[in-house]
Amino acid sequence: MKAIEVRNLGKEFKGGVKAVDGIDLDVNEGEIFGLLGPNGAGKTTTIRMLATMTRPTHGQAMVCGIDVTENPDSVRRCIGIVFQDPALDDQLTGRENLDFHARMYGMPKKEREERIKEVLGLVELSDRADDLIEKYSGGMKRRLEIARGLMHRPKVLFLDEPTIGLDTQTRRVIWEHIIKLNSAYRITIILTTHYMEEADFLCGRVAIIDRGRILALDTPVNLKESMGGDVISLKVDNARRMAAVAKKMKGVKHYKVHDSTVSLTAKDGGSRIPEIIKAAEKAHIEITSVDLHKPTLEDVFIHFTGKTIREQEPGAGDRFRERARAMHRR
Amino acid sequence: MGTSLNAIYIIWLREMKKYVRNKSRLVGNLAMPFFFLAFLGMGFNSLGISGLPAGMSYLDFLAPGIVAMGLLFSSMFAGVSILWDRQFGFLKEIMVAPVGRTSIVIGRIFAGMTSGVIQAFFILGISLLMGVRITSLPGLLASVAFIMLIAMSFVGLGISIASRIQDMHGFQLIMNFLVMPTFLLSGALFPLDRLPAWLAGLSYIDPLTYGVDGLRALITGTSHLPVLLDLGILGGFCLAMILLATYLFKKTEV
């Protein structure tokens, strides 16, 4: 059985804005699956529909083999969710937050105590369990929320931007926890992220999502290989002309013009550079720098969307929100 | 059924933990009633105001009104505090749990009622120390019914409002335009029988009027209306508020 099956799923808000525009995807049991895309791409709306918090306006979604619109209560029992923004009661202690959750899921006392001990150990918060949440750091709050998401042994765990607003070291710690749970409990994990390295490091398969549509879906390795070789970025004085020159060269593909930079892909890229430079000279194009690297998910993203993820990044309002969120986490 | 009761208990338990833990809120809930009793009550007590039943001091008259005032403020606050849960994200945790929305509303209403009864007895204790005469012990015990109804009504109203407004900006507005008039028109501070007709009319629309009147009847032995009428009207209002709160809360999305 698939953990998740989604067919032509969509959400149209009042006023005709299509947050999610008919997506299809299957997630296998035990997989870590990533939805990668910029803010506003529809990742959170997708997760909210799968977690029964928002009703889809069309299409169908099955989670743990149960239809999310027909039987949301049963879906809720089989999933755990960690929200993008903190959702803890900071006037209660860590243990009390977990206890509240366990009781909401109807666990008897003995089971409750055992599970709380177990998940606290898993995220290494046992010694801070009786502190009020307001004394926790942002990373500790996240870890506690992940622990809470696991309390009722969900089959599928949703993590919405699990490391947003966290510093690099804390992010690493969270990643290790995510991998640990996936391997120790065989939990299916669906996460959204707009961090390329996160998707690359954690996910077995990644769907690149933009403007409510899935543009590509594969393993990070396959996605990168689909680029057809190494990425050569040239900074030049006339990017358009350089692109035209490159287009005529054999085995050079996927050129993308971005400001004064032209990005090409070619098998065994290093050996093609002299040839490219010669061609540029012939066309009187001045090259100011050359960069050669193995393709990253960032390159794949640019390839499919035509933009870097940063360009589609937050407007002023979003940035403010993110800063506020980071403050809140601290 | 079992799971619903369990959920009501959990929601209640969380609120009670926070209530007991939050000393400043406890003290804050008692401070204003105390000031009213001590400064307003003692002030008018020495002047004497006309229109009180024979032999009744202003402080005796005021005490039940101040109990009702304390309940009004703290219960509205308890209901509206769902907004804090929304703001700090905890409401999502509650909403995504496999628990009916009705249980969540009932749990919060019971929690507000419990803390209301505790608070009311503190205020009555303070009143006694100031020399307020309580006429009968059975009456005092019976007044608990009114205390519970007042508390549940206004927690319900608070939840209803919190389900309709999205953030905390509306909160101050509610305090100024709903809570203050409800308090001032309720007959907590002055007798209703000599008011101009328009003012009396407004007072009879105010549901708290029946709470104040009922408490006064049971605690100090004088009232404007028959106690059972007070009980009936307040009970009806309470039920309406619980149903409204449940209906509106079910419609909220987080």
Image: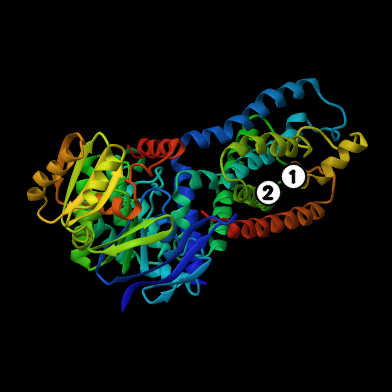
Q: Amino acid at mark 1?
A: Leu
Q: Name the chain under label 1.
A: B
Q: Measured from the top left, where is residue A71 in percent x and y?
A: 48, 74
Residue A297 visible somewhere in the drawing: no
**Please, what secondary structure does the residue beneath circle 2 have?**
helix
Residue drawn at the location 60% of the way across and 54% of the way down: A15
**Residue lying farthest to the right in this orientation:** B197
Q: Which mark is residue A109?
A: none
To which residue does mark 1 refer?
B208
**Residue lying farthest to the front in this orientation:** A282
Does A193 sit left or right of B122 as displayed? left
Which of pointers 1 and 2 lies earlier in the amino acid sequence?
2
A323 over A158 or under it: above or below? above
Nearest to the observer: residue B142 or residue A214:
A214
Q: Which mark is residue B150?
A: 2
A9 over B46 or under it: above or below? below
Residue drawn at the location 50% of the way across and 47% of the way down: B86
Q: Are marks 1 and 2 in contact (CB under 8 Å)?
A: yes
Image quarter of residue B48: top right
Q: CA distance from mark 1 to mark 2?
A: 7 Å
Q: Residues within 10 Å of mark 1 (few under 14, many from 20)?
A: many
Q: Residues within 10 Å of mark 2 (few under 14, many from 20)?
A: many
Render colour scheme:
rainbow
